[in-house]
Amino acid sequence: MPEAGWAGKQNGELLRLAEIDFDILLTNDQNMEHQQKIKSFDLAFVVLAAPTNDIDDLLPFMPAVNEILSSIKPGNIEYVR
């Protein structure tokens, strides 16, 4: 995100920056929990198991995401399939 000054940041460094201003990370990276120590971040993770990150593929997941947002806690990861 160039606007946030995050351009060129990757992996754990990017997540550390995100946890400063955000509570939840919404992603379609289904390998994140295998690449990062999720519990070490002050973030909750919601992973969309969509075939692409195209809005038409993501929209059907939003009702389930809305339900998860009210109860997910930092360090947890929820998959929406």
Image (cartoon, rainbow, N blue to C red):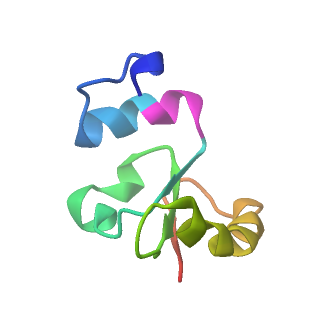
The vertical placement of 20 against 31, above or below, is above
* Rendered location of residue 55, percent (x, y): 57, 60
| Location of residue 66 by image quarter | bottom right
| Residue 75, horizontal then vertical, whole percent | 48, 57
Determine the main secondary structure of the stretch shown in magenta.
helix
How many discs mark residues in the rendered view? 0
Picture quadrant where residue 35 is located: bottom left
Residue 11 sits above or below residue 35 on the image:
above
Residue beneath the point at 66% across and 75% down: 60
What range of the chain is rendered magenta?
18-22
Q: Where 55 sits versus 16, above or below?
A: below
Point out the image quarter for the N terminus: top left
Is residue 30 or residue 73 the one in the foreground? 30
Q: Is residue 20 magenta?
A: yes
Percent x, y for residue 42? 49, 43
In the displayed structure image, the side of residue 45 where residue 72 appears, left or right? right
Residue that lies at the very extreme toward the bottom in this rendered image: 81
Q: Does 12 appear in magenta?
A: no
Q: At which x and y percent is residue 67? A: 76, 70
Residue at image point 31% right, 61% down:
32
